[in-house]
């Protein structure tokens, strides 16, 4: 019995202010009726027009939190999500996903296998994150190569860098009607002498959620098949089977705070049990133990402002369950990944107007997937991936001009188990898929970036950045050979793939002062040897009567171009604000045809009003139909209207700030499906229908 890999797009718990997707509501507890609501989005670094860098933190982050990382940041400019369910949804950035969007926790790899398949959840809980950073350009080169889409860094405070002057904490609890969902989270921090202590935990339990109308895209009479020769599957209404999610995590950290720096450790345990809402159904039981160490010394020696060493060990595993003939879950495959990473950073003081950081990074990981019934490999042979890197980032400012430079070199090796024996599948067509040859591969990667910003008038700036990013083929792109039910494919790797190179050019214009603010980003990404999965026409392979489309890893020249922007207005003393935003991108092969899983253009409007502790807001997003699909994609992806509204009240009582909130989501009960969701799920599993979320949050 094999498992189906899947997951559905969902924005859920803690999203009690989807409407405030760009609102900073840090003054909720204040009783000042003259509050100016900042609707320009999260705080951005001074060089954001060069990179750009987006930072979600504070109440804004709390307002946007979902059960997954993709759901949390999926409404940021240029960001969408894979939409694989309440338990798994990864960010898609400017039409790029998987290994092209790296996920970090506290600057180090999250250590999971989410880049291999969209049904594999990101093993970094976001419920108690302090901030989430979205990085591109030179800033992304600080952490990794190959992030042509961008990089997401989830930061928590488990290793505190300063001593709290008093105990602080926060508690949040909510209930969601669409899935009978119950969520609770809490964090507390304090100190004992020179030792700072942090504890956080979160629990999220969601049953199968209600859907608007039919589970099958196009209704019950629509005959979809993936591959097309497959018989149509059952159409559902009401509750969608295998759309549940149960998650809990616990994190503990302690750090010694000295006069010139700190030294700290943290431990985390994550458990995640979630359904796979494909036609065949299934679920995944995921767990991870993670251990982190950090040390930083300020002003260690002449000319340097700090030296920092950080390291992490993660032991990840998940078990995939299919549904047997009796309708019960049956364990099918066990995935394991042991990852170790260490990095050293030295930051130097200003030299001729330039400040920068250089350092080294070492990463080791070992992934293993085993069929439980046979003990043989599952999709991918056991593979060890080693990476050694050097990096150097510089930034300077001279009056109205700013500039930054980035340089990174990586040596990456992929070493599969050469003794693996691939199993020939049943097949239809001219010939069986040819298995990749098992061979060790080494890749030398050189990435670099340069950018400039000109503040040509008070509050106005324009910038230009150019980045070259090189990526080594991942283990699954090189060595996969087997059934992948979540995407309804038989995956075939190509061990002869070359490194992928992207040339990224971006122009930015921004107005940062006054009641009316705005920004526009225009970008062009040119790829050499773009790696993608090619659906072989008329070919299918699998096991017995389960035959799936054959998808072969190939390379071709490709281009992604896009534009994104927002315009905001604050009504100053009346405590009201509005934001108009839009983004669009499109990827094509240079030889003709569209890249797969490209996001649809979006446009939206958000409004908010605050007075005497009350905050009311609403948001409307229109996503256009996506009919520019790859030749093998079934579609088009339908357009949708997403309307949300929220109301909250905050009162401070005895040094505790209490907030009660409610949020009505998908008020129009629209059928929402993302173009970035693989069609094996997108065709059969829509987003949740109309729901009401209520909750209480306390901060002290």
Image: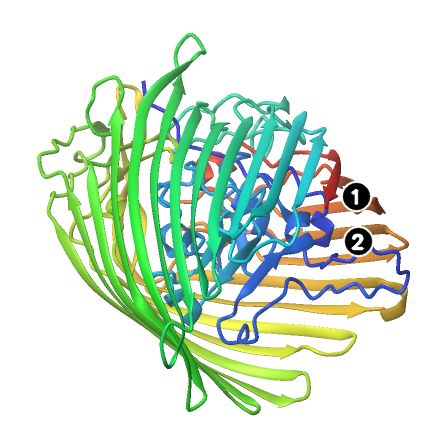
Residue 456 percent coordinates (x, y): 61, 90
In which quadrant of the rendered image does the N terminus lie? top left
- Read off the residue under disc 2: 28
Which of the 4 image quarters holds residue 5? top left
Residue 551 percent coordinates (x, y): 29, 41
Which of the 4 image quarters holds residue 46? bottom right
Q: Are marks 1 and 2 in contact (CB under 8 Å)?
A: yes
- Residue 556 vs residue 262, the one in the foreground: 262
Q: Residue at x 73, y 51 (%)?
A: 19
Residue 483 percent coordinates (x, y): 29, 31
Residue 485 in the figure: left or right of residue 365 = right
- Residue 586 vs residue 126, the one in the foreground: 126
- Residue 487 vs residue 358, the one in the foreground: 358
The reply to whether residue 432 is in sight is yes
- Read off the residue under disc 1: 659
Q: Residue at x 12, y 33 (%)?
A: 420
The local secondary structure at tag 2 comes to: loop
Q: Residue at x 27, y 52 (%)?
A: 363
Q: Number of callouts in the render?
A: 2
The reply to whether residue 668 is in sight is no
Residue 393 in the figure: left or right of residue 415 = right
Residue 155 percent coordinates (x, y): 51, 53
Which of the 4 image quarters holds residue 591? bottom left
- Residue 147 vs residue 668, the one in the foreground: 147
Q: Residue furthest left?
A: 419
Q: Is residue 92 above or below residue 573?
A: above
The local secondary structure at tag 1 comes to: strand
Labels 1 and 2: the sequence-earlier one: 2
């Amino acid at each position: 019995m094999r498992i189906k890999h899947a997951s559905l797009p969902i924005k859920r718990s803690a999203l009690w202010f989807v409407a405030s997707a760009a609102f900073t509501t840090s003054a909720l507890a204040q009783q000042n009726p003259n509050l100016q609501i900042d609707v320009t989005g999260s705080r951005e670094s001074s060089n954001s027009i060069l990179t750009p860098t987006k930072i979600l933190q504070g109440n804004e982050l709390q307002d946007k939190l979902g059960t997954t990382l993709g759901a949390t940041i999926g409404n940021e400019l240029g960001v969408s999500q894979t939409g694989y369910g309440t338990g798994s949804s990864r960010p898609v950035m400017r039409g790029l996903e998987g290994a092209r969007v790296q996920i970090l926790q506290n600057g180090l790899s999250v250590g999971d296998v989410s880049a291999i398949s969209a049904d594999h959840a990101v093993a970094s809980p976001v419920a108690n994150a302090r901030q989430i950073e979205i990085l591109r350009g030179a800033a992304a080169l600080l952490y990794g190569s190959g992030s042509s889409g961008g990089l997401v860094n989830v930061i928590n405070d488990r290793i505190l860098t300063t001593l709290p002057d008093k105990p602080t904490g926060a508690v949040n609890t909510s209930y969601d009607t669409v899935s009978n969902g119950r969520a609770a989270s809490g964090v507390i921090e304090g100190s004992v002498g020179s030792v700072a202590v942090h504890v956080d935990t979160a629990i999220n339990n969601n049953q199968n959620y209600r859907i608007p109308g039919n589970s099958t895209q196009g209704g019950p009479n629509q005959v979809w098949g993936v591959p097309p020769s497959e018989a149509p599957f059952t159409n559902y209404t009401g509750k969608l089977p295998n759309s549940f999610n149960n998650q809990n995590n616990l994190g503990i950290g302690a750090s010694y705070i000295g006069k010139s720096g700190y030294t700290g450790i943290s431990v985390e345990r994550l458990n995640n049990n979630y359904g796979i809402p494909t036609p065949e159904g299934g679920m995944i039981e995921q767990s991870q133990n993670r251990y982190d160490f950090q040390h930083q010394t300020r002003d260690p020696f002449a000319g340097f402002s700090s030296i920092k060493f950080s390291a992490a060990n993660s032991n990840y595993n998940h078990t995939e369950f299919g549904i047997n003939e009796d309708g019960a879950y049956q364990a099918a495959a066990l995935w394991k990944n042991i990852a170790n990473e260490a990095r050293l950073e030295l930051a130097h003081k200003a030299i001729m107007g330039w400040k920068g950081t250089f350092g080294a990074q070492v990463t080791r990981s070992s992934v293993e997937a085993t069929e439980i019934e046979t003990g043989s490999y599952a999709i991918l042979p056991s593979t060890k991936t080693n990476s050694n890197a050097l990096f150097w980032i510089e930034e300077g400012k001279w009056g109205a001009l700013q500039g930054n430079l980035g340089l990174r070199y990586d040596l990456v090796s992929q070493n599969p188990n050469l003794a693996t024996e691939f199993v020939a599948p049943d097949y239809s067509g001219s010939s069986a898929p040819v298995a990749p040859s098992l061979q060790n591969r080494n890749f030398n990667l050189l990435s670099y970036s340069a950018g400039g910003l000109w503040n040509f008038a008070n509050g106005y700036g324009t910038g230009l950045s150019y980045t070259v990013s090189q990526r080594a083929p991942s283990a699954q792109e090189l060595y996969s050979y087997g059934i992948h039910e979540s995407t309804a494919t038989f995956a075939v790797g190509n061990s002869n793939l070359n490194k992928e190179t992207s040339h990224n050019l971006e122009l930015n214009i921004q107005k940062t002062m006054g009641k009316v603010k705005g920004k526009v980003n225009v970008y062009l990404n040119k790829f050499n040897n773009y790696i993608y999965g090619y659906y072989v026409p008329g070919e299918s392979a699998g096991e017995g009567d389960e035959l799936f489309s054959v998808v072969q890893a190939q390379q071709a020249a490709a281009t992604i171009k896009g534009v994104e922007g927002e315009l905001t207005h604050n009504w100053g003393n009346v405590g009201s604000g509005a934001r108009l935003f839009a983004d669009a991108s499109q990827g094509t092969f240079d030889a003709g045809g569209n890249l797969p899983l490209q996001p649809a253009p979006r446009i939206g409007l958000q409004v908010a009003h605050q007075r005497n502790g009350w905050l009311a807001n609403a948001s409307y997003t229109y996503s256009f139909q996506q009919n520019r699909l790859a030749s093998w994609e079934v579609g088009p992806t339908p357009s949708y209207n997403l309307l949300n509204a929220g109301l909250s009240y905050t009162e401070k009582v005895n040094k505790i700030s209490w907030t009660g909130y409610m949020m009505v989501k998908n008020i129009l009960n629209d059928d929402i499906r993302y173009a970035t969701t693989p069609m094996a799920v997108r065709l059969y599993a829509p987003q949740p229908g109309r729901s009401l979320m209520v909750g209480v949050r306390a901060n002290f």
